[in-house]
Image (tube, rainbow, N blue to C red):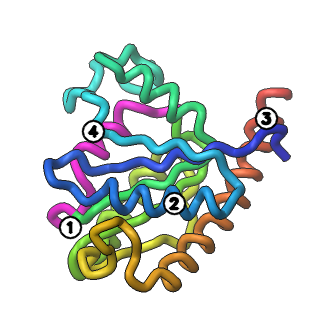
Amino acid sequence: MTSSPLRLAVIIGSVREGRFGPVVANWFADQARLHGAFEIDLVDLAEYDLPHALPAVSPRMEPNPVRPGNGMELARRLTAADAFVVVTPDINRSFPASLKTAIDWHYTQWDRKTIGFVGYGGNTGGLLAIEDLRAVFNELNAHTVRDNVAFPRYYLHFAPDGSLSDPAEHEDSANRMLDQLHWWATALAAARGATLAA
């Protein structure tokens, strides 16, 4: 077991103008606070300006490069997290380029940590983006939990104040995913600690 509360970073993946991501992320962050197993850090990628061009040296050789602008702050926040929830729309049947850039600019931050997903979109509810993200995070030695939260036709679910018109189903999905995240985050944090102590 860990000696301090587990830290969950909820990442808003879309940075486009007029995005709906913050509404979904704020709803989920509220659910995570009610769940009570994590300290929550709401990370908005729109606050960071990582370039799409990656460092010349492979992250396998230099996993923590100097990041321009306020990118080092983002790296610190991701490093501090024991688990992540990525909030993502479907963009042309996959996830936003801003999210891929943030993932690729980091390497050790995802290693041996657990990740869940909240998707939103049209008919698919972000599931196409989530499936692509599972493959990407698997390459980075992260564990993605089975359950997710999806909002097909998200604009029909949320009221103007950010609340859900029929919350029970999505609250249940969120709690199931948070339970899985907590189990895996606890196990992986203990394993990381044992490795450091060895």
Q: 98 or 143, which is in the foreground?
A: 98
Quarter of the figure with residue 89: bottom left
Front label number (2 vs 3): 2
Front label number (4 vs 2): 4
Residue identified by numbered label 1 = 93
Upstream in the sequence, badge 1 or badge 2? 1
Magenta span of residues: 91-108
User: Residue 130: percent from the left, percent from the top?
Assistant: 37, 65
- Position of 175 with respect to 153 (left or right) is right
User: Residue 183: percent from the left, percent from the top?
Assistant: 73, 60
Residues at marks 1 and 2, CA–CA distance in whole angstroms: 19 Å
Q: 140 or 149, which is in the foreground?
A: 149
- Mark 1 and mark 3 in contact? Answer it, CB < 8 Å: no
Q: Secondary structure at mark 4?
A: helix
**In the drawing, what numbered circle is on residue 46?**
4
Upstream in the sequence, badge 4 or badge 3? 4
**Residue 94 drawn in magenta:** yes
Residues at marks 4 and 3, CA–CA distance in whole angstroms: 32 Å
Residues at marks 2 and 3, CA–CA distance in whole angstroms: 22 Å
Q: Tag 1: residue type?
A: Arg
- Position of 158 with respect to 59 (left or right) is left
Upstream in the sequence, badge 2 or badge 3? 2
Q: Is residue 131 visible?
A: no
**In the drawing, what numbered circle is on residue 193?**
3
Q: Tag 3: residue type?
A: Gly
- Position of 159 with respect to 172 (left or right) is left
Residue identified by numbered label 2 = 116
**In the drawing, what numbered circle is on residue 80?**
none
The residue carrying pointer 1 sits among few (fewer than 14), some (14 to 19) or many (20 or more) residues within 10 Å by Cα, namely some
- Mark 4 and mark 3 in contact? Answer it, CB < 8 Å: no
The residue carrying pointer 4 sits among few (fewer than 14), some (14 to 19) or many (20 or more) residues within 10 Å by Cα, namely some
User: Residue 168: percent from the left, percent from the top?
Assistant: 52, 84
